[in-house]
Image: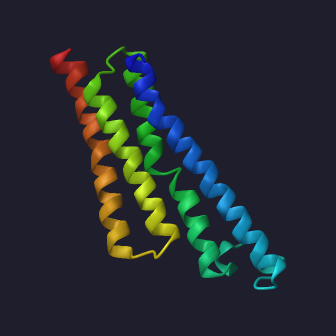
């Protein structure tokens, strides 16, 4: 595989994670409505009416479009500038692994301190990817 393929593979895995979480959210919402645990009119304009087990999926799904935006931006810029390297690849894999662990915690037992620790770790990895990209672009070459 090329360096581009290695760099983009974690992105494909993250996209798969988004679809998995989205599917889980849909199933959880359908079940909650089917079981009468929620009335559709109570959640038509406000997601806070869903039961907690459903909101975990919804919140995690939304979370997949926050910090990961910075991840996708740096991937695109690394590729556009042809500065992708093995450091960026390793950081990309670490970030996506952190997203998977974060999702497992968030949609599972939801231990907030553990979830926060994993979030900060992943956030730091993306920040490091940007620092590395900046160094490659302006200093190292």
Relative horizontal placement of residue 18, taking residue 76 as reference (left or right): right
Q: Quadrant of the C terminus?
A: top left
The reply to whether residue 44 is visible in this rendering is no
Residue lying furthest bottom: 37
The reply to whether residue 40 is visible in this rendering is yes
Relative horizontal placement of residue 10, taking residue 140 as reference (left or right): right
121 or 6: which is nearer to us? 6
Residue lying furthest left: 139
Relative horizontal placement of residue 96, taking residue 56 as reference (left or right): left
Task: Report the residue at 29% width, 21% height from top.
Answer: 85
17 or 139: which is nearer to us? 17
Task: Report the residue at 43% width, 18% height from top.
Answer: 1
Percent across and percent down for residue 3 are 37, 19
Relative horizontal placement of residue 41, taking residue 83 as reference (left or right): right
Percent across and percent down for residue 66 are 48, 51
Task: Report the residue at 32% width, 74% height from top.
Answer: 113
Task: Report the residue at 47% width, 63% height from top.
Answer: 104
For residue 77, which quarter of the picture? top left
Relative vertical location of residue 136 with respect to residue 73 in this rendering, above or below: above
Percent across and percent down for residue 102 are 42, 60
């Amino acid at each position: 595989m090329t360096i581009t393929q290695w760099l983009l593979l974690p992105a494909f895995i993250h996209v798969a994670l988004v679809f998995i979480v989205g599917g889980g959210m849909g199933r959880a919402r359908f079940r909650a409505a089917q079981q009468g645990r929620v009335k559709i009119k109570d959640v038509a304009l406000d997601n806070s009416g869903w039961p907690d087990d459903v909101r975990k999926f919804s919140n995690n799904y939304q979370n997949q479009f926050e910090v990961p935006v910075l991840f996708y931006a740096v991937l695109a810029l690394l590729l556009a500038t042809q500065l992708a390297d093995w450091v960026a690849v390793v950081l990309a894999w670490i970030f996506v692994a952190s997203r998977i662990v974060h999702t497992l915690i968030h949609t599972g037992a939801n231990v907030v301190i553990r979830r926060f620790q994993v979030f900060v770790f992943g956030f730091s990895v993306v920040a490091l990817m940007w620092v590395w990209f900046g160094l490659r672009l302006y200093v190292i070459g």
